[in-house]
Image (cartoon, helix red, strand yellow):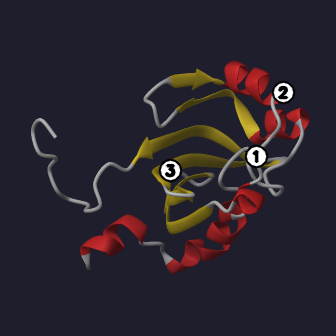
Amino acid sequence: MAKEMSFTHIDPDLLPILEELRKREPIFHTAAFGCTLEDFQRMTAPDYWEVGASGRRYSREFILNTLGGIDRVDADTAGWHCSEFGLRRLTSDCYLLTYTLDQNGRITRRATIWEKFDKGWRILYHQGTLVSVEQDDTLPKIGA
């Protein structure tokens, strides 16, 4: 398998789930994910947390309080683009969705753990990591 395929491989039986989840990304920035504080509460597990691209950790409470006080950026309107999706089944109801997000030149790798539950989909965990090099599987130069 080519190196790039190892990052984006998706078993064919997971393609319907991929189609459901990719519409919800980037989280907090798509109509399919939701637009209201109530939507955000429903779509995040009670113990949800995330690691931002800065490396800071954010609790669900902090995220919900922040989202409640700002205007939400819509990814499509802002010209953001998701690509290089990957999906792995972790358990019968949990999935790891990975992708690359281009926010008009600010490139991040994203990982979201989604759980299927009685009311639909919700997020257990999310992480964004800034891309600082253009090649995968390379070591950074010391002092660079």
Separation (CA) of disc 1 from disc 2: 13 Å
The amino acid type found where label 3 is placed reads: Arg
Q: Which mark is residue 73?
A: 1
**From the viewer's perspective, is the residue at label 2 or at label 3 nearer?**
2
Q: Is residue 9 left or right of residue 117?
A: left
The mark tally for this picture is 3
Find residue 97 and report its image quarter: bottom right
The amino acid type found where label 2 is placed reads: Gly
Indicate the position of residue 18 as horizontal and vertical percent values. Answer: 62, 68
Mark closest to the chain's N terminus, 2 or 3: 2
**From the viewer's perspective, is the residue at label 1 or at label 2 nearer?**
1
**Mark 2 packing: few (<14 Cα in 10 Å), some, or many (20+)?**
some
Q: Which mark is residue 139?
A: none
Image point (41%, 72%), residue name? 9
- Tell me, yes or no, whether the two marked residues, 2 and 3, touch with CB atoms within 8 Å: no
Q: Is residue 113 left or right of residue 61?
A: left
Indicate the position of residue 117 as horizontal and vertical percent values. Answer: 75, 47
Find numbered disc 1 in the image and state the secondary structure of the residue it sits on: loop
Separation (CA) of disc 3 from disc 1: 17 Å
Find residue 82 and report its image quarter: bottom right
The residue tagged 3 is: 110
Find numbered disc 2 in the image and state the secondary structure of the residue it sits on: helix
The residue tagged 2 is: 68
Image point (84%, 27%), residue name? 68
Mark closest to the chain's N terminus, 3 or 1: 1
Indicate the position of residue 63 as horizontal and vertical percent values. Answer: 70, 26
Find numbered disc 3 in the image and state the secondary structure of the residue it sits on: strand
Image point (48%, 24%), residue name? 56
**Mark 3 packing: few (<14 Cα in 10 Å), some, or many (20+)?**
many
